[in-house]
Structure formats: structure tokens, C-alpha cells
Image (spheres, rainbow, N blue to C red):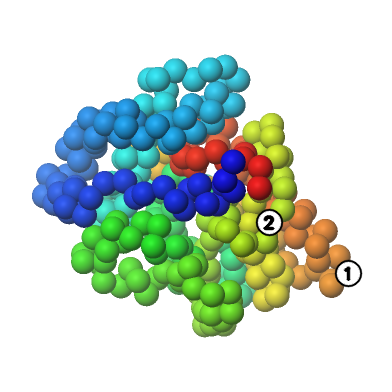
Amino acid sequence: MPELSKQWQARPEAGTRSGLKLLLWVARRLGRPVLHAILLPVSTYFCLTRRPERRASFDYLSRIHRRPATFDEVLRHFYAFAKVTADRFYFLSGQADAIPVRFVIDPRLHQVLASGRAGIFLAAHFGSFEAARVLGPELGGIELRIVLDKAVNGRFIAAIAEVEPELHGLIIDSAQDTVALGLNIGDALKAGAWVGFLADRHRQGDRTAAQRFLGQTALFPSGPYVIASVFKAPVISAFCRLTTAGYEIHCEVLSECFNPSRAERNAAIEALMSRYVARLETHVKACPNAWFNFFDFWAPR
């Protein structure tokens, strides 16, 4: 079986450039309810034609429900992903007011922000990571940068960039070599920007560690925690649950200043990762349709 990082990177991006432009036009001219309505047949089509993703959704939902998932449940999972993907148009084009967002913020986070030190926030392929963009104003106007692989969602990012040219300036491309990536992240932190990672998925060649997740061992990337230790940075988690109308963003402090000694660093990194994975599992169980890793997440390396 191929390594899981190769599995998800090898899958072709769904949709076409013209299709994305059509959705963008609907989002801007007809509004969110109409956009979501037309996504149901689109979701049904992809659910029927994308067999590996359908199988992965079935496996994941069966773990969550502790019984075989039904086709309707898998379809709802696909439909949730389609709606969240479409909502990116609003978050990334400065129209976030069109979507209700509620914040659930750890009181300790305000103390961390008051220190003036930039840090790391760990999100996941859970809900709308782009909703994190509205966190900046909510948390006092902090600047947020996001580490993403631009090539994986190239058509989508290109379509959005036409509407919001500053998008590329907010993204640190994870596909660059390790040295360049580290320098760019370091520059962002030194400039006072918080740097976000999708910490529930690793790329080929990443340093990883095994964690128990939904009853079975899976691999998670260690890079974000190593970076946090190098810069003695605070670390928070940001999980975006789906609600009936919009989103609920949970921000929790995992470490106010991650500064382990050299002798204790490996153990401290594993412990911090375990806290992140535990919080991820809690949110995934509370809102199963919001987790979007459509591949065999538990495949052996």
C-alpha cells in the first residue's frame, strides 16, 4: 500500500477552473443559500464518481459511529465538504460577514496575546481553515500567515487570487525546500505574525510521530512543534466546527511558551502533539462531518 502522504498528494484536484469560476459568480451574485442549494447535485456526482474518497469517508464515519456508515451519511459528508469549500469564497474575498461565526476562546489566550509574542496556531482539515482569517480582528488585529501547499489546490487558489490578490501574501508555500520554508516561517514570526499549520496531515519526507486517533495509530507531522520549540513560541489550537447556519471557532492554548530543554525536547514535542491530537479527536467526535481527510488516514507508512 502506498504511503498515505503519497495517496492524498497523488489524487487529482476535483472540479475544473471554469466550474470554480461559475461557483464564484453564484456566490457573489446570487448569495450563499443558492450556492449551497446547487452544491447538492454536485456533491452527489462526486460521491458517486470519486471511489477512493467515498471509501475513505465510509471507513472514517464507520469508526465514528462504531457501525457501518450508510450511503446517506457519506453523501452528507461530501456535501458538508462542498459547502465549506464554497464558503471559502466569502472568507477569502473579504465577505466573511455573509457567514455567521461564533467564537469560543480560551481565556488564557488573551494573556498570551498581551505578551506581544507571535506564535504557532495548529488547525486541521476540519471545518473551514480559511475562517481563521476572521480570527485576526477577533483577537485584536493580529496578523495570520498560513502554511499550505499551493500546488494541491492550485485551481482553487488561482480562482480566488483573481478576486483577492493579497491571498498569496498570506500563504507560506510548504512545497519549497526545508531551509527556505524554515526561513520564511522564521521571518514571519520575527515580524510579529502568527503562523498556522494544518497539523493533521503530513507530506512525504516530513518528520512524523505516531499517535492514537479514533482507536488506531496514525502518523502526525512533528514539524510545527519543532518550529515552536526553536522560537520558544506559544502554541494554540484552532478548530472550526460546522453549525446549522455557519461556524463555531474554538481556540485553546496548548502551550503559553513552548521552551523545553534540549534533553527533554523530544518528549515535550510528543506530549504537546498528544494534547493537539486529543483536542482534534474531541472536536471530530462532536462534529464528524467537518473532518475532511478523504484518504486512508490510518494506512501504514
Q: Residue type at mark 1: give it.
A: Ala
User: Can you see residue 185?
Assistant: no
Q: Quadrant of residue 92?
A: bottom left
State the residue at coordinates (40%, 43%). Answer: 247
Q: Nearer the viewer, residue 119 or 43?
A: 43
Figure quadrant of the N terminus:
top right
- The residue identified by callout 1 is 263
Residue at disc 2, secondary structure: strand
Looking at the rendering, which quadrant does residue 163 occupy? bottom left
- Identify which residue, 283 or 295, lies in the foreground: 295
Q: Which residue is mark 2?
A: 208
Graded by Cα atoms within 10 Å as few (under 14), some (14 to 19) or many (20 or more), the crowding at tag 2 reads: some
Report if residue 157 is visible in the image: yes
The residue shown at (26%, 71%) is: 165
14 in relation to 74, above or below: below
Q: Nearer the viewer, residue 285 or 109?
A: 285
Residue 266: x %, y % from top left: 80, 62
- Of discs 2 and 1, which sits in the foreground? 2
Residue 196: % across, % down: 52, 63
Image side of residue 153 versus residue 20, left or right: right
Mark 2 residue type:
Thr
Q: Residue furthest right?
A: 263
Is residue 177 shown above or below 225? Answer: below
Say above or below: 196 vs 249. below
Q: Position of residue 299 (x, y in %)?
A: 62, 40
Does label 2 or label 1 sit earlier along the sequence? Answer: 2
